Amino acid sequence: MSLRARLAHLDPPPRLVDWSLFALVGLTAATGLTSFWVGHPSDAAIFWIHAVAGLSIPPLLVVKFRRVAGRVRDRRAWDRATPLSILLAAVAVAAAATGVAWAVGVVVPLGFWTLLNLHILFGLLLVPLLLVHLRARYRPLRRTDVRERRVALQYAGLVVAAGVTSAGLRWLATLFGTPAATRRFTGSRALDSDADLPVTSWVADDPDPVDPTTWTLSVGGLVGRPLELGVDDLNSTAERQALLDCTSGWYAERDWRGVRLGDLLDVAGASEDAAWVTVRSVTGYRWSLPLDEARDAVLATHLSGERLDHGHGYPIRLVAPGRRGFQWVKWVEGIEVRRRPDPRQWIAIFVSGL
Ligand SMILES: Nc1nc2c(c(=O)[nH]1)N[C@H]1C(S)=C(S)[C@@H](COP(=O)(O)O)O[C@H]1N2
Ligand SMILES: [Mo]
């Protein structure tokens, strides 16, 4: 037997390789999407699973590409599904490469985009492409594909190697002092401590500056005494050092000052069945926090000792420690106490301002 043939002989059964790739892509997509909502270290496992599952994919891709290379090179062996399969392969490689490159801190001038944005884009593309691919190439997994002990050992080795690689990538970033050296468990990197926060808004959420003479903050919903406050009614005495971690990959710890949301709720008097608080922007953008967490959040009027400017949410913006940046609603005009989270937030975060 040639070396090549001997190597191929060691490969796990083809269908098992294919189904594992399917499962791993599903797991990385699910954890990748979930990770947008994770801002507290207690949920860091989502990111570890994402890294280990993601890094388990490339070795299986190598096995798979070696298997199908002959068929792809021979144009007569192509069928209608082949071009799509090649595209899928390219996107899978791109998703893995951009993920690894982001994690180690490779710098690529992409203008407004970061490698993380690209990684997310490729990751999202991967799922529909894989489903279409599966439609054309579906083969059920057989008992005999999963019975061998050697295969179980190979897979255990794969997972261990992925975990070691993940730790190794972090170590490399630190060793070489790359931009990823400061990354948190979310993958976001530290902004310089004296740098201005980049004004970051979703899609088209870009209102005109708020006119303080007409703006009011309403506190309503499940409260005994609804409030309507003007700019001068805001008693900014609560101070919070809090870390804003944006899903586009940066974070910054800053000093915020403003009104403790709990103080407003005490005045308004939350009803007994109140359980959630929705914070709504003049643009319709909104997010909901559980009541206890909301009490301790701050509606900030000041950032690093200066009055908020328009870009950062003047006259007030939510500061929600332990939450990702997109939940720190800017240009707040409404507080609604509710029994459940406001389902409209799921639409608003995607289309607000359009
Ligand atoms: N109303 C509103 N609030 C918003 C956003 C938005 O698009 N609209 N963007 C969020 C996102 S994605 C982030 S990271 C932070 C950024 O805050 P900054 O612009 O003050 O840096 O604001 C959040 N608050
Ligand atoms: Mo963000």
Image: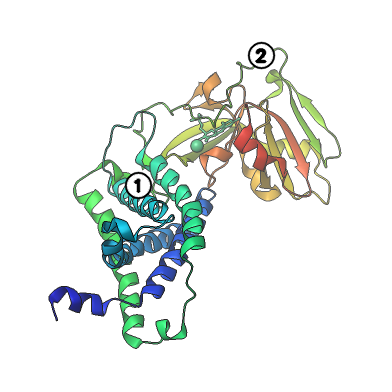
**Neighbour class for label 1 at 10 Å: few (<14), some, many (≥20)?**
many
Q: Is residue 320 above or below residue 132?
A: above
For the question of whether residue 40 can be seen, the reply is: no
C-alpha distance separating marks 2 and 1: 38 Å
Residue at the spot 49% in from the left edge and 75% down from the top edge: 140
Q: Quadrant of the N terminus?
A: bottom left
Residue at the spot 63% in from the left edge and 33% down from the top edge: 351
Residue 171 position, x and y percent, is 24, 55
Write down the quadrant of residue 106 in the picture.
Answer: top left
> Which residue is nearer to you in this view: 50 or 191?
50
Q: Is residue 211 above or below residue 74?
A: above
**Neighbour class for label 2 at 10 Å: few (<14), some, many (≥20)?**
few
For the question of whether residue 261 can be seen, the reply is: yes
State which tag comes first along the sequence, 2 or 1.
Answer: 1
Which residue carries the number 2 mark? 211
Residue at the spot 53% in from the left edge and 37% down from the top edge: 240
> Which residue is nearer to you in this view: 238 or 228?
228
Residue at the spot 30% in from the left edge and 45% down from the top edge: 180
Q: How many marks?
A: 2
The colour scheme applied to this rendered structure is rainbow
Image-based side of 35 in relation to 115, left or right: right
Which residue carries the number 1 mark? 183
Residue 179 position, x and y percent, is 28, 41
Image-based side of 99 in relation to 255, left or right: left
> Which residue is nearer to you in this view: 197 or 160?
160
